[in-house]
Image (tube, coloured by chain):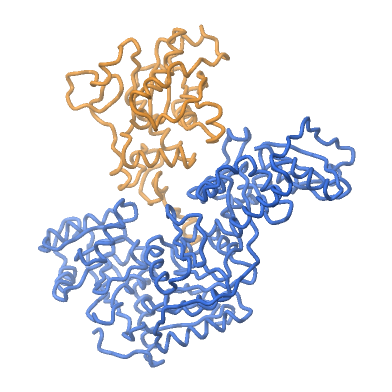
């Protein structure tokens, strides 16, 4: 009996990250489509944030946090993130990136799109791009996690996704380095994709997507070639920080 | 990875190749020449090319792909054969993906093989000691798509763009925890070893009860028979592990390998030292996700069901514990995995305390040979659950209002100095129940909650086992495989859909497992009576009656 019963009255969609059945509406925000325990283990970034890097802040007097005020303000690109890179978020990113559970791009991307809408509501984006992987790494992993996220976001925000950047050098994994090494290692690692016309490009308002923000050096390096040809507005968004 | 499909000239047979130089030498030694028909970057494509071949494509009129240069082999032929022999001895009876094979070699400290690995594998393939398949086939109509690794169907397969082979690939989401299986990943099935050395097995002497003895004899005669499967219906706490010892000893003395499959990691943890103590000279492995024994060689392997996807006809006896439990029951992929790990002519023993109705019918009609053990090893009857109704149970718990029966239960646990195991249907209830107990005058008790996603779950369970906790609130994860001598069980919300007859019987079976502590009780507290509760009670009383009839029950005045 159970069989036809469950065909007639299917269970509601389970939590996106574990398979716990929950009650949710199909068009609810991602946060409401996550089960109770997962919610508990995600540290959402809410409230006041650093105006530059999107780090959660306690006091509201300073617009920028301590790290950001050290960096030259000419290379200023605003960044926002969805959650802190701790607990469940760390686990989920690992499953997504290293285990290769590509399905997870959907909730993560949608969640990022929601956050993007929340913070960057007034920004007139015209296209989305992502942090590229080196060819060898891409071949080894089989997919680019930032690209998948960007594609989901593009679908959600109705924006085209383009590969504007190319990674020129193969760098060893960022996650195994100290802060200082990270900041240096990536110098001039990215170049512009030559398929795109630079005068056309300079008129665009670009949203740059990545999965994790730690020191922000990867994103800053990605922005460099874009700002060199005169792209005025580049905003970045990451899932975790 | 570049793959080739070639044909041996003057024969109709097509072959796959990972390293075409080996094939050339191999066939030249046999006086034949080869013609390459097809080359690709994805094994899936090559495999389906062979599967869908039409005879007119082959050679007649079709120009073979010209290969500009052949590489030189790094090894002489004889040393290649030696290396292949060495590697094959390590890999016998395994089923591995490319990535697993690499980590296997890494674990065994065989690192310098990188350059010669492909020629060796190719030689094993040519000698028919290994089969190559793609991880997933997805060339055919969609309902025929399968993952060769876990044998799941299209439900778990997902088509994605693959940067590795530059094509559209299908990946399997069911077995992703063991490494990603996809269309362009080769999957190797190594033939099992055929040499079996007979040897003397030393077993720690055990004392079995008359009832256990009887079942053991039935099982031993089953291993001599033609039948493939055997169902053992033994009540919770009947001493299933001990009953398996004679059959394990016999199979091991023939030099054959044994696997004990359980659905849960916690049970593997508990079982491995016990088996090791009984068979001190055997290599007993514990395999589960994240186990340190991974890729080791063992004679008796205790594993979670998923690990059996990594074996190919390796075991002559597979004991499947708790067959009716999640995730094993009605999971076709796991079932097929177990089947694949069983050697031809191997035997399977299914252990359960709560067989599904269908199986009982099969056993009655003689389709499935079986034995029933209705008494526990100490001869006490099973504790019969008390069914109690309480209106608006969860409202009361949320608002921390008194619930008389629950309070009474906890008081009873305190008087008999027992430990309370409280089952709840949902994770979020764990906290609520803990707070209820605290607010209702039992704050002095040492309590904890446990559920599947908790990071320190093993630590909490260990503390409960060591009697550091008086009260443990848990979801169904502790329904099986936990033995605490002074246990009292309370099932809150026993009318939940999740708690069917089998689950309730299992939970009731946690009580009274020690012969020295006869006070344990089982209470089902629910808003309504459900079929599950009534059936559970009915089956427990039936088993007690059966045991009494067969004369295995010693003491009667055990429960009210």
Residue at 52% x, 21% y: name it. A163
- How many tags in the picture? 0
Residue at 28% x, 64% y: name it. B423
Residue at 22% x, 68% y: name it. B420
Q: Is residue B560 above or below residue A131?
A: below
Position of the N terminus of chain B by quadrant: top right
Chain for colour blue = B
Coordinates of residue A83 in the picture (x, y in percent)? 32, 34
Coordinates of residue B546 in the picture (x, y in percent)? 40, 88
Q: Is residue B271 left or right of residue A193?
A: left
Q: Is residue A190 above or below residue B529?
A: above
Coordinates of residue A192 in the picture (x, y in percent)? 51, 15
Give A132 or B126, whichever is nearer the viewer.
B126
Give B109 or A103, whichever is nearer the viewer.
B109
Q: Is residue B173 above or below residue A106?
A: below
Give B111 or A238, whichever is nearer the viewer.
B111
Residue A2 visible in the shown view? yes
Q: Is residue B190 left or right of residue A239?
A: right
Residue at 64% x, 79% y: name it. B226
The colour with which the image depicts chain A is orange
Position of the C terminus of chain B by quadrant: bottom left
């Amino acid at each position: 009996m159970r069989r036809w019963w469950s065909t007639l009255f299917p269970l509601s969609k389970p939590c996106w990250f574990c398979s716990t059945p929950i009650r949710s509406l199909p068009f609810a925000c991602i946060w409401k489509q996550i089960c109770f325990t997962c919610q508990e283990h995600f540290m959402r970034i809410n409230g006041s944030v650093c105006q530059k890097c999107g780090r959660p802040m306690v006091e509201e007097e300073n617009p920028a946090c301590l790290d950001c005020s050290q960096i030259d303000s000419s290379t200023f690109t605003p960044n926002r993130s969805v959650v802190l890179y701790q607990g469940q978020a760390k686990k989920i990113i690992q499953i997504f990136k290293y285990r290769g559970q590509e399905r997870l791009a959907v909730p993560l991307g949608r969640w990022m799109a929601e956050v993007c809408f929340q913070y960057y509501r007034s920004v007139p984006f015209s296209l989305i791009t992502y942090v590229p992987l080196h060819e060898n790494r891409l071949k080894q992993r089989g997919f680019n996690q930032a690209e998948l996220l960007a594609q989901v976001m593009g679908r959600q925000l109705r924006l085209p996704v383009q590969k504007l950047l190319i990674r020129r050098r193969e760098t060893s994994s960022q996650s195994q380095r100290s802060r200082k090494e990270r900041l240096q290692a990536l110098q001039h690692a990215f170049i512009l994709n030559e398929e795109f016309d630079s005068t056309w490009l300079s008129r665009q308002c670009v949203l740059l997507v990545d999965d994790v923000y730690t020191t922000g050096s990867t994103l800053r390096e990605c922005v460099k070639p874009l700002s060199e040809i005169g792209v005025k507005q580049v905003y970045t968004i990451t899932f975790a920080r | 990875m570049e793959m080739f499909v070639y044909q041996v000239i003057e024969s109709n047979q097509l072959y796959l190749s990972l390293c075409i130089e080996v094939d050339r030498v191999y066939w030249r030694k046999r006086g034949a020449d080869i013609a390459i028909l097809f080359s690709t970057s994805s094994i899936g494509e090559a495999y389906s090319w062979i599967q869908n071949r039409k005879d007119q494509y082959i050679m007649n009129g079709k120009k073979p792909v010209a290969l500009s240069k052949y590489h030189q082999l790094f090894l002489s032929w004889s040393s290649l054969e030696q290396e292949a022999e060495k590697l094959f001895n390590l890999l016998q009876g395994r089923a591995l993906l490319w990535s697993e094979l690499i980590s296997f070699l890494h674990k065994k400290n065989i690192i310098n093989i990188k350059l010669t690995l492909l020629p060796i594998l190719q030689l094993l393939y040519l000698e028919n000691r290994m089969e190559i398949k793609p991880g997933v086939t997805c060339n055919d109509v969609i309902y025929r798509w399968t993952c060769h690794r876990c044998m799941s169907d299209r439900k778990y397969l997902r088509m994605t763009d693959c940067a590795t082979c530059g094509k559209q690939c299908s990946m399997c989401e069911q077995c992703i925890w063991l490494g990603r299986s996809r269309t362009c990943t080769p999957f190797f099935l190594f033939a099992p070893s055929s040499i079996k050395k007979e040897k003397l097995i030393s077993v720690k002497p055990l004392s079995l009860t008359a009832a256990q003895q009887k079942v053991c004899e039935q099982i031993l005669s089953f291993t001599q028979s033609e039948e493939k499967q055997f169902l053992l219906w033994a009540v919770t706490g009947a001493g299933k592990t001990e009953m398996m010892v004679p059959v394990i000893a016999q199979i091991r003395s023939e030099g054959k390998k044994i696997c004990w499959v359980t659905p849960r990691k916690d049970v593997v943890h508990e079982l491995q030292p016990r088996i090791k103590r009984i068979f001190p000279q055997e290599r007993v492995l514990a395999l589960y996700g994240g186990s340190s024994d991974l890729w080791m060689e063992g004679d008796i392997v205790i594993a979670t069901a998923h690990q059996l996807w990594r074996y190919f006809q390796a075991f002559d006896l597979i004991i499947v514990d708790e067959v009716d439990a999640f995730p094993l029951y009605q999971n076709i992929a796991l079932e097929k995995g177990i089947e694949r790990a069983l050697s031809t002519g191997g035997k399977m023993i299914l252990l359960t305390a709560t067989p599904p109705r269908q199986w009982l019918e099969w056993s009655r009609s003689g389709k499935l040979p079986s034995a029933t053990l209705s008494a526990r090893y100490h001869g006490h009857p099973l504790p019969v659950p008390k069914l109690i109704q309480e209106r608006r149970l969860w409202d009361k718990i949320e608002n921390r209002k008194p619930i008389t029966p629950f309070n009474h239960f906890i008081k009873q646990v305190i008087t008999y100095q027992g430990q309370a195991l409280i089952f709840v249907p949902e994770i979020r209830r764990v906290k609520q129940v803990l707070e209820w107990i605290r607010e209702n005058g039992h704050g002095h008790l040492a309590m904890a909650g446990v559920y599947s996603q908790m990071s320190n779950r093993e630590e909490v369970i260990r503390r409960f086992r060591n009697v550091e906790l008086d009260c443990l609130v848990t979801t169904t994860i502790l329904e099986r495989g936990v033995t605490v001598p002074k246990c009292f069980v309370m099932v809150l919300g026993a009318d939940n859909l999740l708690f069917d007859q089998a689950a309730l019987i299992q939970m009731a079976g946690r009580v009274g497992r020690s012969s020295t502590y006869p006070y344990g009780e089982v209470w089902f507290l629910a808003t309504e009576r459900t079929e599950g509760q009534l059936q559970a009670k009915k089956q427990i009383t039936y088993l007690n009656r059966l045991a009494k009839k067969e004369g295995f029950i010693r003491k009667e005045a055990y429960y009210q």
